[in-house]
Image (cartoon, rainbow, N blue to C red):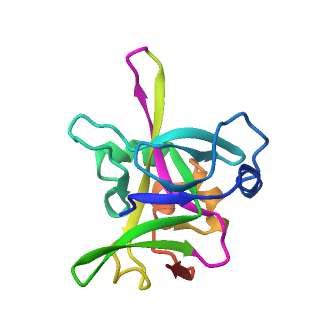
Amino acid sequence: MCGRYELDTIKKELWERYHIVEENNKWFPKAEVFPTDVCPVVIEEGKIVMMKWGFIESFSKKPLINARAETILQKPTFRDSFLHSRCIIPVTAFFEWEEVNGKKMKRKISVENMPIVSLAGIKKSYSQPDGSLQERFSIITTNSSKQIEKIHDRMPVILSPKDEESYLNHQLPALEVTKLLVPTKETLIIE
């Protein structure tokens, strides 16, 4: 599960991390990003756009903010997006809630020596009443790594920098790309 994350970095650092040519996107660092917030999303190498977090589907009362890696090719809601519209969600950390003595404690989780991390995502376009299209994203989750499993049984898919280009390459067979949807082996910092 990934229900909130942080993107607390200046625009210049974000643009340098993803080799972005300066674009006129209005964005400011956020210590906490919530579902339905508008956030920067990498849609191809060198290009960031702003999107809302959460797919909107008629069968769900809430935005679908996560997609399970294990079933992404089986679920009609997510399959086409995974095949044709993968994206990367930049974060500086994500949050999970750990139950301690019957109380929920918010934990901030980041990756050691990686100030900006790439989460695997998918995107989808939705028609608006005015005829325009609105793009939205969902974060792909997987089973938790050993470091996280005591906090939560799910975590976002954290892509290694060497896998980012492959993840965004829609020419690669989908089954090849699903091999990237695994718990991270990076050392995590849990606060």
Residue 124 belongs to magenta span:
yes
Horizontal arrangement in the rendering, residue 147 relative to residue 87 (left or right): left
Q: Quadrant of residue 27?
A: top right
Residue ranking furthest to the top: 130
Q: From which residue to which does the magenta span run?
A: 111-130
Q: Confirm whether residue 8 shows in the render.
A: yes
Q: Residue 143: x, y in percent?
A: 36, 73
Q: Quadrant of residue 118?
A: bottom right
Horizontal arrangement in the rendering, residue 20 relative to residue 150 (left or right): right
Q: Residue 104: x, y in percent?
A: 29, 73
Determine the residue positioned at 47% across, 55% down.
174
State whether residue 134 is above or below residue 108.
Answer: above
> Where the N terminus falls, by quadrant?
bottom left
Residue 117 belongs to magenta span:
yes
Q: Residue 160: x, y in percent?
A: 61, 69
Determine the residue positioned at 52% across, 39% down.
51
Horizontal arrangement in the rendering, residue 166 relative to residue 94 (left or right): right
Most foreground residue, 139 or 78 = 139
Horizontal arrangement in the rendering, residue 101 relative to residue 3 (left or right): left
Q: Quadrant of residue 68?
A: bottom left
Determine the residue positioned at 36% across, 47% down.
78
Determine the residue positioned at 40% across, 48% down.
35
Q: Main secondary structure of the magenta part?
A: strand
State whether residue 180 is above or below residue 100.
Answer: above
Q: Residue 44: x, y in percent?
A: 64, 45
Most foreground residue, 134 or 32 = 32
State whether residue 149 is above or below residue 18.
Answer: below
